[in-house]
Amino acid sequence: MNRVVSVVVPVFNEEAGIVDFLDEQLLPVVRGLKYEIEVVLVNDGSSDKTLEKINGCKLKNKIDFKLISLARNFGKEIALTAGVNHASGDAVVMIDADGQHPVEMIPRMIEKWEDGAQIVTAVRDENTTKHKLGSKFYYAMMRTFGNKDVVVGAMDFRLIDRGVADEFNKFTERNRLTRGLVDWIGIPQTYIKVKTKDRTSGKPTYSTKKLAALTMDSLASSSRTPLIIFGYIGMFITIISLILGSFILIQQYILGDPLKLDWSGAVAMSVFVSFLVGLVLISQAITALYISQIHTEAKGRPLYIINKRQSMGIDKKKK
Ligand code: UDP
Ligand code: MG
């Protein structure tokens, strides 16, 4: 039986470039492959003429083509998820429709997959593109507080094996980042460097504001370090004010101010207030830990991911 490769494309308001992408870029590349190809296009509630353009493309009459239309715009991550859910291939390639992901790399990804790679991730070749300030900030935050292994320049252009897609389909969380989930699965990834291109038409949706929101979201979903930092600050304040408070108590009120500091009651008062602030921060961090436990449970992620199943040892029948 022929093996099938699915190509999943999320599309939102790409009327200007979608036909060029499907017919001029994607079609020639996938036709050259020795696999059966299935294109799963997810129309993420486009409000322009995208759908009409898709219906007029050549590609849909030449290869197996699934068009999934979402009822409204759900955002790229959800559109991508819908696409992977509906892909039936032995390998699933995810690619943007805006022409930024070089389709000519798909055969390279497939080669790596044939060599046994289960996840092939495209990484922006740093020599060709300068990182925007926004994405630099994103990576700096993620590296410091979130997932330490986040690979700089990893793109949403990747190939996953059927096994990985099956695991991916088990995730039920709503607020999701495909990249984060694929990283979380933990199956080693093979990276290939690619040169990105400029968007062929239309506008990118990740504005600075969206990128900032994305940074906060991925931090909140991948790390509780920020919460714990405040707990530590609280502990620090509490300990310092405890020491300071004991010092004031002993030197001023018990020993009768031998150092002649002559501190007023206001000093003692502010030390006491800082002590309380410290306690509040600590208790907040403790509450946050409980919340983060609830958060983890609520996400309902699979308990574990099996990479490979092997049976070894003696064959009972032959004994
Ligand atoms: N996209 C989508 N839903 C959205 C926004 C974008 O399906 O709400 C698609 C879009 O058509 C494109 C891909 O996701 O194929 C990447 O979008 P974009 O180029 O705007 O994002 P960026 O390149 O900035 O990551
Ligand atoms: Mg883009």
Image (cartoon, grey):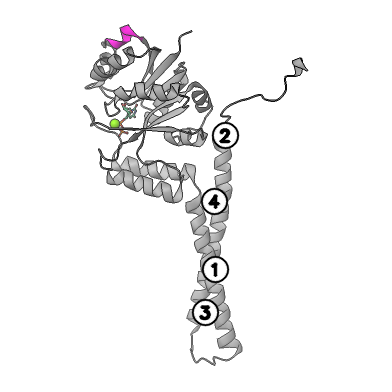
- Is residue 229 part of the magenta span, yes or no? no
C-beta proximity under 8 Å, tags 2 and 3: no
Element assignment for label 4: helix
C-beta proximity under 8 Å, tags 2 and 1: no
Nearer the observer, disc 4 or disc 3?
Answer: 4
Q: Looking at the picture, which amino acid does disc 2 mark?
A: Gly
Which disc, if any, is residue 268? 3
The answer to whether residue 265 is left or right of residue 58 is right
What residue is disc 4 on? 288
Range of residues picked out in magenta = 58-63
- Classify the position of the C terminus by image quarter: top right
- Is residue 62 part of the magenta span, yes or no? yes
Relative image position of residue 258 (x, y in whole percent):
54, 93
Instruction: Identify the main secondary structure in magenta.
Output: helix
Q: Residues within 10 Å of mark 4 (few under 14, many from 20)?
A: some
Label located before the other in sequence (4 or 2): 4
Which disc, if any, is residue 238? 1
Task: Evaluate whether residue 193 shows in this view.
Answer: yes
Q: Using the image, determine if residue 115 lies above or below residue 270.
A: above
Element assignment for label 3: helix
Label located before the other in sequence (1 or 4): 1
Relative image position of residue 210 (x, y in whole percent):
33, 40
Relative image position of residue 124 (x, y in whole percent):
32, 36
Residue at 63%, 25% in the rendered image: 310
Q: Residues within 10 Å of mark 3 (few under 14, many from 20)?
A: some
What residue is disc 2 on? 300
Residue at 27%, 26% in the rendered image: 98
Quarter residue 74 falls in:
top left
Relative image position of residue 268 (x, y in whole percent):
52, 79
Q: Using the image, determine if residue 208 lies above or below residue 105.
A: below
Q: Looking at the picture, which amino acid does disc 1 mark?
A: Thr
